[in-house]
Amino acid sequence: MRTVLKIVLLTAASLAVPFLPVAPAAVFIPALVLLLLLGTDGDGRRTLVGVILFVGLLNIPLLLRGPLIFFGYFVRVLLMTLLGYALVATTSTGELISALRKLGFPEGVTMALCVMVRSLPMMSRLAGEVRQAQRGRGARGIRGTLSLAVPLLVLSIKLAEEVGESLEGRAFGGRVPEFREKR
């Protein structure tokens, strides 16, 4: 029941964020980041920093409309993302599945959300491994950061295929898998 309440409260807070003025929303971010930093280990901290940088990169096109518009969107999107991160960081996959079922989510949506939540730490770990390998080859600075995109895209597609094959092999959704010959 606690997880259901947590999901409902975080969803309500996320839905309210776009209607907040920028200044109050900006005040919540340092407090939320500090709480998340205190409650996570080294990998979690790196993931959190990556999330903040990713949200900033997503909002860069808004700089063309002006720095205040960029900052407004950045603050709101970051706050919504951090609220989601707080849910993921403090809830086990089993608790999340149970809570989503109690809230009446369809099985497919529940499974998709849980697979997504489980894949985020994996992708963070893979990004760290790719970054280390590229540093070993001499990639540094912005060039090293930008060169993460292709390997991560390939690895995420591979991960998605593996998860899809696993679900298909377990007849998820009531479909019996068709066996194909590998070439």
Image (tube, rainbow, N blue to C red):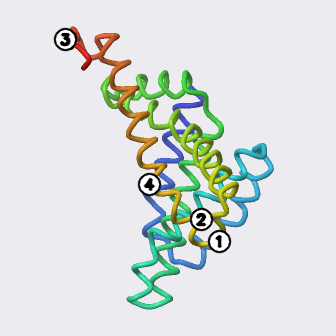
Looking at the image, tell me whether mark 2 or mark 4 is earlier in sequence order. Answer: 2
Residues under numbered marks 1 and 4 in contact, where contact means CB atoms less than 8 Å apart: no
Mark 3 vs mark 2, foreground winner is 2
Name the disc covering residue 141, or none.
1
Neighbours of disc 3 within 10 Å: few (<14), some (14-19), many (20+): few
Q: CA distance from mark 3 to mark 1?
A: 47 Å
Q: Is residue 22 above or below residue 101?
A: below
Alpha carbon of mark 3 to alpha carbon of mark 2: how far?
42 Å
Q: In whole angstroms, how far apart are the C-alphas of marks 2 and 1?
A: 5 Å
Gap in Å between the C-alphas at discs 1 and 4?
A: 16 Å
3, 124: nearer the viewer: 124
- Residue 173 % position (x, y): 25, 16
- Mark 3 or 1: the one toward you: 1
Mark before the other along the chain sequence, 3 or 2: 2
Secondary structure beneath label 1: helix
Give residue 58's quadrant in the image: bottom left
Q: Which residue is mark 2?
A: 144
Give the labeled residue for mark 4: 150
Front-most of residues 152 and 113: 152
